Image: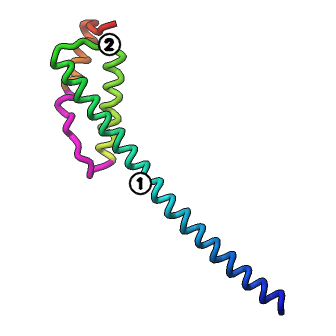
Amino acid sequence: ALFTFIGKILTKEFSESQKALVDRVDILSDKIEAVAESVAETRAIAARVRILRFGDELQEGRMHSKDTFDQTLLDIDNYERYCKEHAEFKNHVTEATSAFIQEQYQERLRKHDFTR
């Protein structure tokens, strides 16, 4: 009877301890998800800034390499994907600039007019 009583106490303590641990893991998991979302949003904003800056440089007549265009096109793809996946994110501020960059890219491809 004594061992049964001690066993029940230990089992109860273990169960409470395990529940507390699970609760902490859940809280940490939520925090990790929030940080991941914040990082993803920060990356999208950084891509938007690079897209707009690149578009401004093209408008000013600055020449760029094909590699720089390719990287900017990847930024455009990643930014647009993020916007589609996050409807609450203020997006579509790069649509005109993105179209202009893509037009310039096609034109320079035809003319072989990239910097080296």
Marks 1 and 2, Cα distance to the nearest angstrom? Answer: 37 Å
The residue that disc 1 covers is 34
Of the two numbered discs 1 and 2 on the same chain, state the one appearing first in sequence: 1
The residue nearer to you, when weighing 30 against 94, is 30
Q: Is residue 24 above or below residue 50?
A: below
Please tell me the numbered disc located at residue 18: none
In the displayed structure, 21 sits above or below 50; it is below
Q: Nearer the viewer, residue 17 or 33?
A: 17
The colour scheme used to paint the residues is: rainbow
Left or right: 25 as drawn, with respect to 67: right
Work out which quarter of the rendered image holds the C terminus and state it.
top left
Q: Residue at x 23, y 46 (%)?
A: 90
Q: Secondary structure at mark 1?
A: helix
Identity of the amino acid at label 2? Ser
SS for tag 2?
loop
Amino acid type assigned to the residue bearing label 1 in the image: Ala
Crowd tier of the residue under label 1, counting other residues whose Cα lies within 10 Å: few below 14, some 14–19, many 20 or above: few
Q: Which residue is found at the position 58% from the left and 71% from the top?
A: 20
Give the residue drawn at x 54%, y 65%: 24
Magenta range is 86-99
Of badges 1 and 2, nearer the viewer stands 1
Label 2 belongs to which residue? Answer: 65
Whole-percent x and y of residue 10?
74, 80
- Crowd band around label 2 with a 10 angstrom C-alpha radius: few (<14), some (14–19), many (20+): few
